[in-house]
Image (cartoon, rainbow, N blue to C red):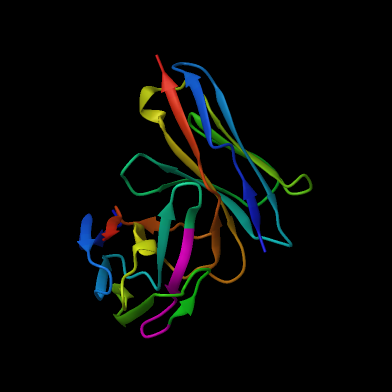
Amino acid sequence: GQNIDQPTEMTATEGAIVQINCTYQTSGFNGLFWYQQHAGEAPTFLSYNVLDGLEEKGRFSSFLSRSKGYSYLLLKELQMKDSASYLCALAGGYQKVTFGTGTKLQVIP
Amino acid sequence: DVKVTQSSRYLVKRTGEKVFLECVQDMDHENMFWYRQDPGLGLRLIYFSYDVKMKEKGDIPEGYSVSREKKERFSLILESASTNQTSMYLCASRWDRGPGNIQYFGAGTRLSVL
């Protein structure tokens, strides 16, 4: 099976940088997703990492280390609209995507 | 833009009722999914379908069934609703091009079973 751990909640200041961690235990997976979900809305895709290393996309970056069972999402120049839940998910066997419980990020002025 | 539409945002039903949750996507996606989302438990997969009339059980299929008669529509059925099925239900779809393909989600249906 797959076990995914994320912090439940985080608070950060507008303009700052925040790192949201995701650790997992799994026998194998194809890649790792990050999704953003604003309260009351649908999750939306942020990133997908297959290889180890950092993938940068504007203010958001995602990192994967398969050997350490670890990923993080880095958000720079935080804005109030970044207040949301961030979901880490593993792409496993055929069609299967397993989600973590999500990290609720609150950005304060 | 990909659009995944769920028929209701909020639904209130009574214990024992048969409940239908409908999901329609407009991008000709092969794969469709039903999840429920509960505080502290995250998104859990109930059922998915990789083609018309095909279905596979997810992690928590008990108490649910599904129907996919047309490619664009995937229905979740609660045969006899129970209070522990009170939850947020999310539908998703994607193209069948491997596990790295992005899932597109609907806005969700918040179901309360009284």
State whether residue A16 is above or below residue B63.
above
Check the image and name the residue furthest to the top: A109
Residue at 34 percent across and 68 percent down: it is B82
Name which quarter of the figure residue A23 lies in.
top right
* Residue A74 placement (x, y as % from top left): 57, 31
Residue B51 is a magenta residue: yes
Direction from residue A11 to residue A50 in the image, left or right = right
Q: Is residue B66 magenta?
A: no
Q: Could you tell me how many numbered marks the image carries?
A: 0
Looking at the image, which is closer to me, B100 or B44? B44
Q: Would you say A97 lies left or right of B14 here?
A: right
Out of B26 and B64, give the one closest to the viewer.
B64
Residue A98: horizontal and vertical position, in percent? Answer: 56, 59
**Residue plotted at (45% across, 22% down):** A78
Q: Residue B43's x, y, as percent?
A: 47, 55
| Any part of residue A34 in sight | yes
Tell me: residue B68, above or below residue B83: below
Q: Residue furthest right?
A: A67
Percent across and percent down for residue A46 are 47, 43
Q: Splitting the image into 4 quarters, where does residue B93 fall?
A: bottom left
Seen at 33% across and 80% down, the residue is B68
What segment is highlighted magenta in the picture? Answer: B44-54
Residue B3 visible in rendering: no
Quarter in which the C terminus of chain B is drawn: bottom left
Q: Is residue B4 above or below residue A65?
A: below
